[in-house]
Amino acid sequence: MGTLKASSGRIGQYKILKTVGSLCKHLLETELLSEASLFKFLGKYKTIVIKPVFGPDEIFISHENAKFEIRSGAKITTVMNKEEIYPHLICNEITQNYYIIQPRWINSGFIKSHFQSFITVHRKSASSEWYLKSKAEKYSSVFGRFFYKLFLQKIKKLSIVVAKKLGESFPGCNSIVIDIGYNQKGNIWIQDTALHFPKSKWSQYLILTDKSTLDTYLPDTDLFSQVTFNDFLNRYHKVIIKPCFGKEGLGIVQISSNNHLSYEIHTGRKKFTKSSLEETYQFIEEHYLSKKYYLVQQKINLAMINDCPMDVRVIAQKVDSNWKITGKIVKVAENDFFITNVAQKLLSLEDAIRYLNISNLNNDTLESKIDEICISAAGQLEADMKEINMIGFDIGITDQGNLWIIEGNYNPNLSMFYMLEDKKIYMKMLKAKRK
């Protein structure tokens, strides 16, 4: 399958971690996928997993009584001859240049005695100490939570060692997600590691929450897993899932719970109804999770203009070494869209406030507060990404006039500002950009 060049992928990270003696017993044997490595692993293990060097997606192969079962998402293929497996993978399953192969650490007969969590380890800058920032169960289990707490110090120590070692090789990465498996005996496996560089929305969220004055403006957010998805739907009844690495609203989905009787999945203008939470999760897993890492986030009830949600795009630019707000524009979503990336109308903030008719909303006060929040957020994000000099923030406004930081974009499209009648704002931003 060729020679691997990129060291930040799974095989590169594995080789780095393998140099740390204390981690070796916790690492799953890992090799690049080839026909030879496939036969080798099938000879040693009952179940194996194949993953791309970059990104999600997993292909499981198990064998029993000379029969091989290949499971990829919801699709299951059975072959009787070991020699048929590799050609089948190449023709039907493999979509990237490089894949790794590992044993599956869970034995299918003992699922309930094995547990799995996503551990996020974070540091505020390359010179700061790593610490455990977040833990998300992958599958719901009361026993899993109990044993996680029982082995917490061991898991925490192991995660910090992993982050320190990877952080040495990737100084630009300040957030690392470690997929950790553990069982009732206290055995711990490092199932996977994922580097979240500054452009990751998960890394951005963690950096912003480091500043207490910004925390109240951030929607509740977590890594997507079956457990966090269920938990967020129970708490908020309406959630957004979005790719950690994405742009222009691609892959963003809204899921709504109708008193747990049915679930609506809304993407673009399309809406699907599912009768159960399990069916909803399976749909998301099949259509989205195999392609990208995802976050789950509480849905903010944005203020509406003519029954269409709106938000404010705010441009923050570095001017003479200081962050300044150089432009604001209100985006009104197209009919039947829940996000404003596809906008039917662009307005000045002053005009939008007249449309909204919110009694306690004063234009000057609102503008001043938005400026304050975005300048503070820009300064915070700059600590994680020194080279940035422009950020486009999407700021949500609710019917009550409350403000939310939806996200920041490091390469914002300025052309929408040219659509405004007053071209001074657009020219001002271009001038600041050239400096």
Image (tube, grey):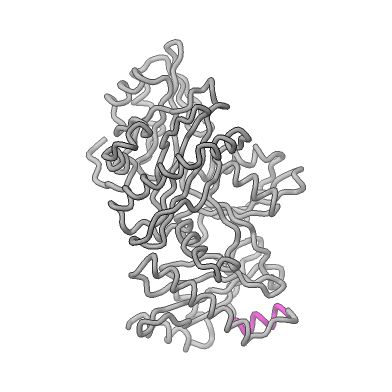
Q: Is residue 176 visible?
A: yes
Q: Which quadrant is home to the C terminus? A: bottom left
Percent across and percent down for residue 259 are 77, 47
Residue projecting furthest to the left? 3
Residue projecting furthest to the top? 65
Q: Give the left or right position of residue 275, taking residue 287 as reference.
A: right
Front-most of residues 149 and 90: 149
The residue lying at 62 percent from left, 72 percent from top is 403
Percent across and percent down for residue 134 are 51, 51
Which residues lie in the magenta part? 348-357
The residue lying at 34 percent from left, 26 percent from top is 87
Q: Give the left or right position of residue 147, taking residue 40 as reference.
A: right
Percent across and percent down for residue 101 are 35, 31
Judge whether 202 appears above or below 217 on screen: above
Residue 138, picture quadrant:
top right
Percent across and percent down for residue 115 are 53, 33
Judge whether 185 appears above or below 241 on screen: above
Q: Which quadrant is home to the N terminus? A: top left
Residue 423 forms part of the magenta stretch: no
Q: Main secondary structure of the magenta part?
A: helix
The residue lying at 38 percent from left, 33 percent from top is 26
Front-most of residues 372 and 145: 145
The residue lying at 49 percent from left, 53 percent from top is 133
